[in-house]
Amino acid sequence: MTIGAPLGKDLVGLEHLTADQIQLILDTAEPFKEVSERPIKKVPPLRGKTIVNLFFEASTRTRISFEFAEKRLSADTVNVAAQGSSVSKGETLVDTARNLEAMRIDMVVIRHPASGAAQFLAERIRSNVINAGDGKHEHPTQGLLDLLTLRDRFGAIKGLKVAICGDVLHSRVARSNIWGLLKLGAEVAACGPATLLPRGLADLGVTILPRIEDAIGWANALNVLRLQLERMESGFVPSLREYNRIFGVTRDRLARAPNDLVILHPGPMNRGVEIDSDVADGPHSVILPQVTNGVAVRMAVLYLLAGGAPDWRALGGEER
Amino acid sequence: MNPFLITGARVIDPSRNTDGIADVLVVEGRIDAVGRNVSAEAQVRRIDGSGMVVAPGLIDLHVHLREPGQEHMETIATGAAAAVAGGFTGICPMPNTDPVIDNQAAVGFVVRQAIRAGTARVYPIGCISLGQKGQQLAEFGEMVGAGAVAVSDDGKPVVSSQLMRTALEYALTFGIPVADHCEDPTLSAGGAMHEGIVATRLGLKGIPAAAEEIMVARDIILAELTGGHVHLCHRSTRGSVALIRRAKETGVRVTAEATPHHFSLTHDACEGYNTNAKMNPPLREDADREAIRQGLRDGTLDCIASDHAPHHYDTKQREFDEAPNGIVGLETALGVGIRDLVTPGLMTLPELIARMSTIPARIFRLPGGTLAVGAPADLCMFDPTRRWEVRAGDLHSKSANSPYLGETLIGQTVLTAVGGRIVFERGVSKTDA
């Protein structure tokens, strides 16, 4: 691993990263956590870098998290939303890419509804590309912030049992979690109705748990995925009410769970569907620490892709 | 039309079950003589065939030529040029053009454009339903009168079982097969590739094998009911092969084709979101590819068809979900067949030629597929050992959407003649008298 490009040019997913590279990102995120706790939340490593946040899909949390990460590293940023841009006038992704390239930007953060869009862009421009979620493929920074949150709680990922619950079929968060957790030595299970579990999960090394009670009894942590309303409309589940009754993470189901069971959720939550409010707001939940860690992890990724040394202080990061 | 004599080639003619070194004399558009030491007048052009194979011209029952309507992807002329460059002397274009080929005038247009192009013979396939809408039968009789050799709504499945039944019955009058692209659209909707581990990893919606097999089973049952001839296009799954094998054992009039890509590639080719590996039916698993190979070997699958489907590079340079289905195949079919079926010993060269020429000619009742004396001289000569790299710039098709770009194939056409006229040559050594 050479200093200067420890992750390569882009971050399109966790599938093709090594355990060492993932650890490096998590380790690099640690000191960045502290930056966000300062009264003046800014360090200089990306001064003079221009970054485009290219969002072809609505996003609040991820876009804002990236934007804070970029600004706290002193980068100049531009947000492009697909609505109102040339994309809505029929421009193809390849033309969008070439135009960005022609403006000599340094990095692109892309969110896109098509699986593979981030890689498509990465192969066509010299700038660094960071995948902020592509279709049902990957959402690597979400996977990383989940890992960081679990590491904060348990000290290490190795040996942890993590159950990913709900709509794994349509979830990029699930895929990034599966790769990251397996690479760092966790055991991974998927739990949900068979209509929402993709084919071949077992071949990836994921255990299938058919019932949420089994997952709660087995896991150290549950990562509860959002159930989108469209899934009911397209017939994957009969009703949100039944989904909550059979697969919801409820206080009753957690009654016998160990105190240190941790519950993650990538947000935005459907309270009363996949997760009940008193669970989301209760002692098992680490949902808000996840959001806090999101900024630190994204700072780490931006910093490393920009060529930062694994110890960012070596580049003159300011001490408080 | 000048006579010519190919000397000392390995002449393979599955129609007569012959395979041996011989000379082939072509005079006045017909095979004049095949044998040792054929004599010809001094002014007849001699072509050195040593090391070469001479075979009946290849026949492809399943191509898309995009004309009328999408001439930026391919025209009948460029598609026919690609055909003869690949050793094909006869090709059957599917009717899913814009407008579709669902009436006698449209069939006549295809025939006329092919005559104008003056290379490969083009035998149009007409629509099963008007506008390919899956409701009202097209005029089979009028289309056959204008030159159609089969009917198909290819590109779309025939969803209505009643329409399929009627088509099979009505086609009996004209002695033509009904070719079906078997797909249950309720199972395949939104799918971009084979449903399996690769789709799961890439986050793409899968098309299960069952989407194909359900329709294969239905078509077999309807062929049995009606006594009609159903031709099952581009089969891709092991389940389909098993269903067809059982149907043939019970005497149902079913024929089937497989494409070079389904016997040579798997869904692994989609890795990296390679849109040149996106087609419908999709590339399947290793076990499916193996079943397709075995099906071709034992005759469950009667013939090889390319499903040549040109697309402009703009449309393939897209997000995988947005990219269109299909690949070009006319110029790579023979090289893939020799590399992946003959070289590993799955079938002999004469068996491959039978599945690419003589048998497809019989299925659609086309002339050709033979080197019998007196037959029109539709033939190809190829170097069966030549290794060549597939390069976009070398293809004669207007499009280059091939998953084989950069790969090395084995066996390449050097000469193609249609009706005794040499319509394609690639570096033929000349020994003119």
Image (cartoon, coloured by chain):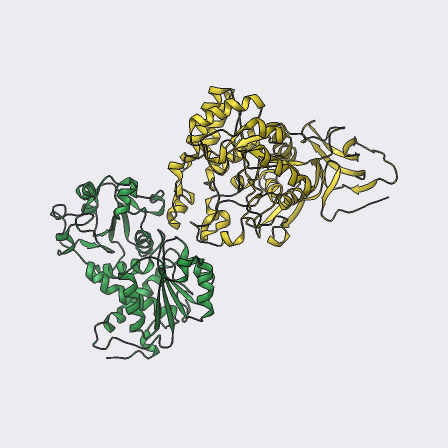
Chain displayed in yellow: B
Quarter of the image for the N terminus of chain A: give it: bottom left
Which of the pair B92/A304 is nearer the observer? B92
* Residue A3 position within the rendered picture, expressed as x and y whole percent measured from the top left: 40, 71
| Residue at x 67%, y 29% (from the top left corner) | B367
Where residue B287 sits in the image (x, y, percent)? Answer: 46, 37
Instruction: Tell me if I can see residue B88 in this picture.
Output: no
Number of numbered labels in the structure image? 0
The percent position of residue B318, horizontal first and vertical second, equals 46, 54
- The answer to which quarter of the image holds residue A176 is bottom left
Quarter holding the C terminus of chain A is: bottom left
Residue A206 x/y as whole percent: 31, 47
Q: Any idea which chain is the green one in this picture? A: A
Q: Would residue B121 be found to the left or right of residue A39 on screen?
A: right
Q: Quadrant of residue B369?
A: top right
- Residue, far front: B105
Left or right of residue A29, residue B264 in this image? right
Residue B315 vs A198, above or below: the answer is: below
Q: Is residue B306 above or below residue A141?
A: above
Which is nearer the eye, A194 or B51?
Answer: A194
Is B347 on the left or on the right of A229, as rendered?
right
Q: In this rendering, does residue B294 appear at all?
A: yes
Task: State the residue at coordinates (28%, 53%).
Answer: A186
Q: Residue at x 37, y 72 (%)?
A: A308
Q: Nearer the viewer, residue B91 or A314?
A: B91
Asked whether A164 or B373 is in front, the reply is B373
